[in-house]
Structures are given as structure tokens and as C-alpha cells.
Image: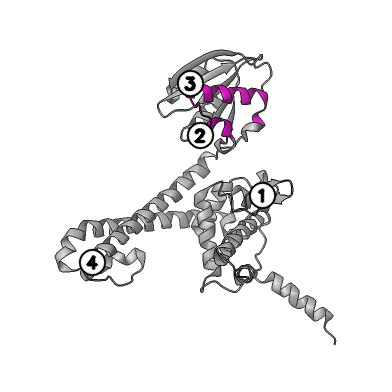
Amino acid sequence: MRENATLTAGLDLGDRRSQICMIDESLAVVEESKIPTTRTGMERYFRAREPMRVALEVGTHSRWVSRALEELGHEVVVANPRKLALIYKSHQKTDRADAELLARFGRLDPNVLSPIRHRGPDAQRGLTLIRSRDVLVQARVKLINSVRGTVKAHGARLPTKATDRFHTVSDEIPEDIRESLSPIMACIEKLSEEIRACDKTLEAMANEDVHVEALRQVSGVGPVTALAFLWTIEDPDRFPDGRTVSAYLGLCPRLDQSGAQDRQLPISKVGDPYLRRLLVGSAHYILGPFGPDTDLREWGLAIAARGGGNAKKRAVVAVARKLAVFLYALWKSRATYEPLRQRQRQTCAHAAVSPA
């Protein structure tokens, strides 16, 4: 905590107004108030204050609020809400109570809040572009499914077409509903153009980044996945190893150990859901019919071959988890990826013990 700081603030951010609770060294509440959740409101309230620690929860406004408060000289602790069951599971949850609990945790031991670190402006701008593309893709999929469903309801069926060329099947739509569906088909065509523009921008950004080249050595990892991985992790040095990265992305099983019981649970699904989805998509390609022959593919297929319920699903998640470890290692070392390294080692070892 900052030296000589006598006050600690808990800030419960609301969409329009935020609740503030101030406590002193004796943990007594000395001030409570509400201020507008605007840059002007935050600066007007905190500018005249002595440097202090401010605890707040991560959320929609936490990024710009934390940056604004740090520029004013305050120490900001951004709490992980998943770790604050005392707040979000409270039976008497109010803004005043939440702000006071944040202030007390921030005063006594900020580590209890499992503080997170917001990404820098460059990484955030890049992720905004990638997620904007994802929104466009999802909108296009919904519109295409709507058109296909409507055509089927009229006794016809549209031919299979690549998604980015779906608008070319307009002539295949039954004539009696073609005009009614034309606005949707026009939207699909426009969305495809915007998605192609995003892809072109992302491809150019990927070509300018030397780290992307290292990550794209792995089959199934395209420019979008590589850039999303780099911008989401942002600084590889904040993780001790690749396994920590896979846990950070929610690809590791949850733990529930008590005494002699140690139950196997599904993955935690914490962290960034979009990057996790991209890695799972890459894992599907690696294990799919078009995936090239690699150690990672062979390892995943061996897991799927064990059988049992959800064997394929468990194999995909396992490959996605190991893929995160590989990408982290390649980022750190910039080494050349050897897709069949393990098989080559086994072949060499077998040759070494074989009789002459």
C-alpha cells in the first residue's frame, strides 16, 4: 500500500452511478457517497484526494476507471468477481454493502481479491477488431440458418455453399418467397464483405508480427487464433509456464478435494471464452479428417480411442489444452516447431536398441 495513505476506498461501479465507501486505518467507515460513472465525475471526486488504494470489481467500466484513477496517482486493485462469493452470494446485497466489503478487503489484504490486470490499449484495440469480426460471423450464421429454415418450410432445399458465397444461391430460392427474403440475402452479402475486410486487416497485422509467424507453425492455428492468443495473454513473462496459461484460459479441470475424496470435474471455463473457443476449434481441425499427421494429433486420437462417454469431446479439450502450452512455448522460445518430434525420438531410440 502507498506510504502514509490513511484512507482506503471501495468503489462499486454502476452503469450510471457508483457507490463509494471510505475507511480509515482503524477500519471505521468515514465517508459514503455516490458519484456519476463518468470520467468527469471520477476525476472531480478523486483529483483532490490524497493518494490512496481503491478497490473495485472488474466489469464494463473498470478498464477506463482504473486507468483514470491511476493517472491521478491512486493505487487501483481490480478484483476478480469469481473470487468474491461473499459479495455476489450475499443475501443482503446492496451497493453500499458491496463498496464497504471491497474497501475492507482492499485495506486488509488485496490478495484476497485475486486482483486482475487489464490489457494495454494496443492489445485491447486488436481484440476489439477480432471480436467485432466474431459478432459479424455469428450474425451471418443466424441469417443463413433463418433463410435455410424458411426455404425448407416451403418444400425446397438450398444447395450447400461456402458461407462467404451463400448470397449467390438467391436464384435457388422459391420464387414466391424470393422477394420476401431478398433483404436478408442483401444483409448476408454485406456481412460477407465486412468479414473479408476484417480478415484482410487481421492478415496484414499478422504479417507484421514476428510472434504470429512462430505460432502459425502449428497446424490449425490461423492469423485470428494467433493474434487472439498474443493479445489475450499480452505478456508471456507474467506466467511461469504453459500449464499456467492453459489454466488461465479455463482448459484445466476444476478441483474439489476434501479428505480422501478427489473428484474429477469438468474444465473450469474461467478466463477468456472467445480464445478458449478458438483453441477448441483448432483442436477440432487437428483431430479432424483434414488435420496433418502430427504428434499432437496422434496423442489426441489415442485419447479418443480409449472410448467411454464423451471420449471425442475429452480428446478435443485435451488437445486444446496442450495446444495452449505449445503456443506459449513457441512464443517464448521462437523455436522451430517439429510436428513429429516425439515419433522421431521414438524411432531413433528403437534403432539404437535394435541388434545390428
> Which type of secondary structure does the marked residue at label 2 adopt?
helix
> Which type of secondary structure does the marked residue at label 3 adopt?
helix
Front position in the image: 93 or 353: 93
At label 4, the amino acid type is: Ser
Q: Which mark is residue 273?
A: none
Residue identifier under label 4: 170
Q: Are marks 2 and 4 in contact (CB under 8 Å)?
A: no
Residue identifier under label 2: 63
Q: Which mark is residue 43?
A: 3
Q: Which mark is residue 244?
A: 1
Front position in the image: 1 or 144: 144
Q: Is residue 214 magenta?
A: no
**How far apart are the alpha carbons under marks 4 and 3?**
55 Å
Give the foreground label among 1 and 4. Answer: 1
Q: Residue at coordinates 21% horizontally, 60% vertically from top-left?
A: 181
At label 1, the amino acid type is: Thr
Mark 2 and mark 4 lie on one chain; the one further toward the N terminus is 2
Task: Identify the magenta region.
Answer: 84-111
- The answer to whether residue 33 is above or below residue 123 is above
Mark 1 and mark 2 lie on one chain; the one further toward the N terminus is 2
Give the foreground label among 1 and 3. Answer: 1
Tell me where residue 172 appears, x and y as whole percent: 22, 71
**How far apart are the alpha carbons under marks 2 and 4?**
45 Å
Mark 3 and mark 2 lie on one chain; the one further toward the N terminus is 3
Mark 1 and mark 4 lie on one chain; the one further toward the N terminus is 4
At label 3, the amino acid type is: Glu
Q: Residue at coordinates 50% horizontally, 29% vertically from top-left?
A: 65
Q: Is residue 96 magenta?
A: yes
Tell me where residue 183 appears, x and y as whole percent: 21, 56
Q: Residue at coordinates 54% horizontally, 19% vertically from top-left?
A: 21
- The answer to whether residue 267 is above or below residue 222 is above
